């Protein structure tokens, strides 16, 4: 093929390295040069990952957020900052909780571990594993600022939205979450009965002229019974997971472009193999690397912590900017200090896609949401137990959350 994409003349047959003797292009049929032509067809490729509910880090996120929910159920003004560590036959809970009612941390953790499928001793981690609790009350110095409706921490937060999907989320992370959720579903419903808890997904999406047009690669990692071959595992995942999820996006992929358990062997997952920590999957929780992320994680924190509530506010603003067609892509930036009632930074980047002036977009943001800490909490009704469900499959792009609503303006 020449530069004008017309077929070469017969005289231009390939040389010893496969290059066309006339135009030096490499024939598309040569599989070892496939990657070169992928980048000739598409402008770029972007990859994002997600993890299943039984992933060690996500076990910790869900335990921490279950504690947040338990506190807010009995005391909407309770303060929570709890970290969880899960490792070989051991769980450690640590942090700060100030609440009007006592919380049974041990029971909450065991229930989450049981619910996530870690009930067999063979996993070397289960709902019967020892649990250590090191939780004390919130610092009085921090509480002084929070009591005055100020932020419970300093930091910067980012919210993002684009036109890739109906949820105004980037397509790579959206599909990665869809695959992770489906893996959990087929395991829990025993559609694929030989899978164990834990798992990861990864998706590479090709873009042309700024739009997602193809899936070039899917990676799945799932532990399974030793008695089942990798060939059987891949076949089942292709049929019940990959095809099911991709067809909802009108996408297809060849079986050869799906990688399952890259080393060829994975029979035991969970915290016994890979220690988990709260907050370690912040890129999975947000935009899959497609946009900037703030300085703090979300799980285990009550909404006075702007790492969480500020990020939700920024996403709400960005999504509404794109949904109202003020721009095709938007990234909202907020920043606070401990005790701050209002942000010290509130701005927006539209990457040259704006259809209205930046001044008009900023004015729209001001009218859409009061970004004071109390304003965010009030608009989204955040002093209620809604957080455990956020702790897996991403905090954004899911309409059940109040910060995902599109507001009529």
Image (tube, grey):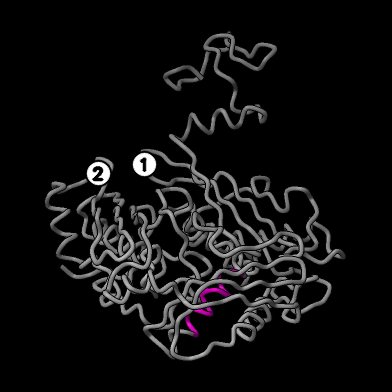
Q: Position of residue 113 (x, y in %)?
A: 67, 77
Give left or right: position of 337 versus 125: left
Relative vertical location of residue 206 with respect to residue 115 in this rendering, above or below? above
Give the dominant element type of the magenta stretch: helix, strand or loop. Answer: helix
Pinpoint residue 363: horizontal percent, then vertical percent.
13, 57
Q: Earlier in the sequence, mark 2 or mark 1?
A: 1
Of the pair 304 and 265, the residue shown nearer to us:
304
The answer to which image quadrant residue 58 occupies is bottom right
Answer few, some or many: residues within 10 Å of disc 1's Cα (few below 14, many 20 plus, some between 14 and 19).
few
SS class, disc 1: loop
Query: What residue would you read off at disc 1?
Result: 210
- At horizontal 36% and vertical 61% (from top left) the residue drawn is 311
* Residue 373 drawn in magenta: no
Residue at 73%, 48% (x, y): give it. 262
Q: Is residue 182 above or below residue 284?
A: below
Question: Which segment is the magenta one?
Answer: 60-70
Q: Is residue 267 left or right of residue 337?
A: right
- Do labels 2 and 1 touch, CB within 8 Å? no
Location of residue 211 in the rendering, given as x and y in whole percent from the top left corner: 38, 45
Q: Residue at x 85, y 63 (%)?
A: 226
Identify which residue, 200 or 375, lies in the foreground: 375
Q: Which residue is mark 2?
A: 353
Task: Say which residue appears at 52% left-offset and 12% top-offset.
Answer: 23
Spot occupied by residue 359 in the image (x, y as percentages of width and height): 12, 49
* Left or right of residue 282, residue 4 in this image: left
In this view, 168 is above or below 350: below
Which quadrant is home to the C terminus? bottom left
| Number of dots carrying numbers | 2
- Which residue extends farthest front? 141
């Amino acid at each position: 093929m020449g530069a004008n994409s017309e077929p070469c003349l017969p005289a231009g047959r390939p040389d010893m390295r496969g290059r066309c003797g006339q135009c030096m292009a490499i024939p598309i049929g040569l599989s070892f040069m496939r990657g070169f032509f992928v980048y000739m067809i598409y402008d770029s490729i972007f990859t994002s990952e997600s993890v299943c509910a039984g992933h060690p880090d996500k076990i910790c996120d869900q335990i921490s957020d279950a504690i947040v929910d338990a506190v807010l159920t009995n005391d909407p003004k309770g303060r929570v900052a709890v970290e969880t560590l899960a490792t070989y036959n051991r769980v450690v809970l640590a942090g700060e909780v100030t609440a009007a009612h006592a919380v049974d941390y041990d029971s909450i953790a065991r229930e989450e571990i049981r619910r996530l499928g870690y009930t067999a001793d063979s996993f070397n981690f289960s709902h019967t594993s020892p649990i250590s609790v090191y939780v004390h009350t919130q610092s009085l110095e921090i509480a002084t600022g929070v009591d005055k409706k100020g932020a419970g921490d300093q930091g910067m937060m980012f919210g993002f939205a684009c036109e890739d999907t109906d949820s105004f989320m980037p397509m790579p992370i959206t599909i990665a979450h869809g695959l992770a959720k489906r893996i959990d579903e087929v395991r829990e419903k025993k559609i694929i009965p030989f899978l164990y808890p834990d798992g990861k997904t990864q998706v590479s999406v090709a873009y042309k002229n700024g739009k997602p047009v193809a899936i070039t690669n899917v990676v799945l990692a799932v532990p399974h019974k030793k008695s089942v071959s990798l060939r059987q595992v891949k076949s089942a995942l292709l049929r019940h997971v990959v095809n099911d999820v991709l067809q909802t996006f009108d996408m297809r992929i060849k079986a050869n472009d799906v990688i399952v358990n890259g080393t060829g062997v994975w029979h035991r997952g969970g915290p016994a193999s890979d220690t988990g920590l709260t907050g370690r999957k912040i890129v999975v929780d947000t935009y899959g690397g497609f946009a900037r992320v703030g300085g703090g994680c979300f799980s285990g924190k009550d909404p006075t912590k702007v790492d969480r509530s500020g990020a939700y506010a920024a996403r709400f603003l960005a999504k509404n900017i794109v949904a109202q067609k003020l721009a095709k892509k938007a990234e909202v930036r907020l920043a606070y200090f401990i005790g701050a009632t209002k942000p010290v930074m509130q701005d927006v980047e539209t990457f040259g896609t704006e259809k209205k002036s930046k001044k008009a977009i900023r004015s729209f943001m001001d009218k859409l949401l009061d970004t004071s800490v109390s304003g965010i909490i009030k608009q989204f009704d955040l002093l209620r137990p809604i957080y455990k469900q956020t702790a897996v499959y991403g905090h954004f792009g899911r309409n059940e959350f109040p910060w995902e609503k599109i507001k009529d303006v």
